[in-house]
Image: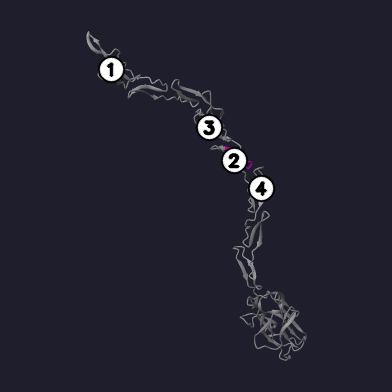
C-alpha cells in the first residue's frame, strides 16, 4: 500500500513502501496475498482447532469456523448436579435429592455427599407364623413356606398346623345333634353355644306337626277334624293320612251261633231266652224265649201246673248313639205266639222294647210270622244307652208258643 514512483532494481518503477498484512484472526482460514487480487483467505475445514470453549469438543473447522459438539457433563450420579462453563468446563456438585440405591431392602433413599444411601430397612415381617421372612437386595422381601405347629389365634380351632403358608386348625365340633338349636363356637372363649331356633323339625310321628321352640321339637296333633260330628276322625301313623270313619251301629242275626254281645237275664230256670233254629227271619237261627220240648220239639211257655208270672230279658249294653247322626233307630224282627186264651192286649203277655229301662214300644198280640219293629233313637243322640227286649207273661193261660227275635240292628245315617 502507499504506492509511489521510485526505483526498483535500479530502474524506475512504481513501488509500495509497505507490504499488506493479510490476516482475519480466523484459525480456520489460511491467508495469502495475491498481487492481483490482494488478500485471499482459504478455508481449513476439517482441521482441528480450538474454539476456546471447554464445554465443546473435539473442535473442528467447518465452513471456515471453529466448532465443537457440546460435551455431555453427566457423571451418571443422581446425587450430583452437573454443570459446564466455557472457561471452567464440567463440574459435578453434590446434592441432597431423593434417589434409588438399587437396594430393595432399604427405604428412605437420599443423597448424602454425592452418594445414594438408604435411611431405613424394609420390614419383611408378614406376621404369618407359617412363613420364613427375609430380604433380597435385588428382589426385596421373600416369604418361604414352613411347616409345623402354629397358632391361628382362633380359640374355636385345635391342632393348628402350617400348610401352604397358612396356619389353620380343625374346627371345634359344636354339633349337639339337635335341629332346634343353632350351634356355634364363641371366638372369644372357645366355648360352644347352642341358641334355640324356630326351625321345622320332625319327631318321627306322621300324625303330628312340629316346630322348634325353646330348643326342642314341640309336636302338635295333626288336625284331622272334617267338621262332621258323626264321624270319628283319626290319623294313620303309618302315612300321616287323615281317616274319617263313619260310626257303625250294631247288627246281630245269630247265624254265627253266638249270643255275644247279647246279655241274657232269665229268672225262670225253665222258660228263658236261647238260640233256636226252628224259625228265623234270616236265614237260619234266631233268639227264642220259651221252652223247647226235647221229645216232640214243641215250643211253649205254658206252665198250667205252676201259674206264675214269667219274664226274661235280652240286653245290648253300652251302645253309643253318636251325636250328629241322622235318623238313629233300633230295629228288629219279632214273631210272637201269644196264648190264644189270653186277651190280645198289653195288659197280659207282651214283648217290650226298652231303652235305658223305659219301654219305647211293645207287641201285645200274636203276630203273623216275623214283623219289623222300629224304635226311634233320635232323643238319645250323643249318649250311650242300654237296649233291652223283655218277654213278660202274666200268671194265667201261659200256653202260647213264645217269642222269636232276629236281625237286631242299631243304625243311622251320617251326612
| Mark nearer the N terminus (4 vs 2) | 2
User: Do the numbered discs 4 and 2 sit on residues whose CB atoms are within 8 Å?
Assistant: no
Q: Mark 1 — residue?
A: 33
Q: Nearer the viewer, mark 2 or mark 3?
A: 3
Left or right for 78, reference 46: right
> Is residue 157 magenta-colored?
yes
Q: What distance separates the C-alpha of mark 4 from that of mark 2?
A: 19 Å
Q: Secondary structure at mark 3?
A: strand
Query: Which quarter of the figure has residue 390?
Result: bottom right
User: Do the numbered discs 2 and 3 sit on residues whose CB atoms are within 8 Å?
Assistant: no
Q: Mark 2 — residue?
A: 169
Q: What distance separates the C-alpha of mark 2 from that of mark 3?
A: 27 Å
Q: Mark 3 — residue?
A: 141
Left or right for 363, reference 120: right
Query: Which quarter of the figure has residue 385?
Result: bottom right
Q: Residue furthest front?
A: 5
Residue 297 visible to the viewer: no
| Mark nearer the N terminus (2 vs 3) | 3
Left or right for 289, reference 60: right
Q: Nearer the viewer, mark 1 or mark 3?
A: 1
Q: What distance separates the C-alpha of mark 1 from that of mark 3?
A: 79 Å
Q: Quadrant of the N terminus?
A: top left
- Establish if 167 lies above or below 414: above
> Is residue 44 magenta-colored?
no
| Mark nearer the N terminus (1 vs 3) | 1
Q: Mark 4 — residue?
A: 193
Pointer 4 local density, CA inside 10 Å: few below 14, some 14–19, many at least 20: some
Which stretch did the figure color magenta?
154-161
Amino acid at each position: 500500500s502507499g504506492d509511489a514512483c521510485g526505483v526498483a532494481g535500479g530502474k524506475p518503477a512504481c513501488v509500495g513502501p509497505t507490504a499488506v498484512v493479510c490476516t482475519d484472526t480466523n484459525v480456520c482460514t489460511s491467508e495469502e496475498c495475491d498481487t492481483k487480487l490482494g488478500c485471499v483467505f482459504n478455508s481449513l475445514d476439517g482441521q482441528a482447532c480450538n474454539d476456546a470453549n471447554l464445554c465443546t469438543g473435539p473442535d473442528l473447522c467447518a465452513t471456515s469456523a471453529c466448532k465443537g459438539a457440546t460435551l455431555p457433563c453427566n457423571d451418571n450420579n443422581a446425587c450430583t448436579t452437573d454443570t459446564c462453563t466455557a472457561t471452567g468446563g464440567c463440574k459435578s456438585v453434590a446434592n441432597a435429592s431423593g434417589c434409588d440405591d438399587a437396594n430393595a431392602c432399604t427405604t428412605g433413599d437420599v443423597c448424602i455427599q454425592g452418594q445414594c444411601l438408604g435411611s431405613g430397612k424394609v420390614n419383611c415381617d408378614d406376621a404369618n407364623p407359617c412363613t420364613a421372612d427375609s430380604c433380597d437386595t435385588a428382589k426385596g422381601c421373600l416369604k418361604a413356606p414352613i411347616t409345623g405347629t402354629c397358632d391361628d389365634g382362633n380359640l374355636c380351632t385345635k391342632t393348628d398346623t402350617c400348610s401352604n403358608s397358612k396356619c389353620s386348625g380343625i374346627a371345634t365340633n359344636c354339633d349337639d345333634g339337635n335341629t332346634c338349636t343353632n350351634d356355634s363356637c364363641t371366638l372369644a372363649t372357645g366355648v360352644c353355644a347352642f341358641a334355640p331356633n324356630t326351625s321345622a323339625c320332625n319327631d318321627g310321628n306322621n300324625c303330628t306337626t312340629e316346630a322348634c321352640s325353646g330348643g326342642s321339637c314341640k309336636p302338635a296333633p295333626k288336625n284331622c277334624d272334617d267338621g262332621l260330628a258323626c264321624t270319628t276322625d283319626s290319623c294313620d301313623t303309618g302315612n300321616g293320612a287323615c281317616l274319617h270313619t263313619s260310626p257303625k251301629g250294631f247288627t246281630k242275626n245269630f247265624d254265627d251261633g253266638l249270643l255275644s254281645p247279647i246279655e241274657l237275664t232269665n229268672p225262670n230256670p225253665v222258660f228263658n231266652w236261647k238260640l233256636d233254629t226252628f224259625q228265623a227271619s234270616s236265614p237260619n237261627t234266631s233268639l227264642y224265649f220259651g221252652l223247647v220240648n226235647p221229645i216232640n220239639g214243641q215250643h211253649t211257655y205254658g206252665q198250667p201246673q205252676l201259674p206264675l208270672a214269667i219274664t226274661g230279658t235280652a240286653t245290648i249294653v253300652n251302645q253309643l248313639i253318636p251325636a250328629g247322626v241322622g235318623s238313629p233307630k233300633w230295629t228288629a224282627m219279632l214273631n210272637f205266639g201269644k196264648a190264644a186264651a189270653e186277651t190280645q192286649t198289653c195288659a197280659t203277655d207282651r214283648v217290650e222294647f226298652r231303652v235305658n229301662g223305659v219301654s219305647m214300644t211293645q207287641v201285645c198280640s200274636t203276630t203273623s210270622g216275623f214283623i219289623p219293629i222300629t224304635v226311634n233313637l233320635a232323643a238319645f243322640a250323643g249318649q250311650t244307652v242300654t237296649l233291652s227286649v223283655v218277654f213278660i207273661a202274666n200268671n194265667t193261660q201261659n200256653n202260647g208258643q213264645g217269642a222269636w227275635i232276629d236281625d237286631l240292628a242299631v243304625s243311622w245315617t251320617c251326612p
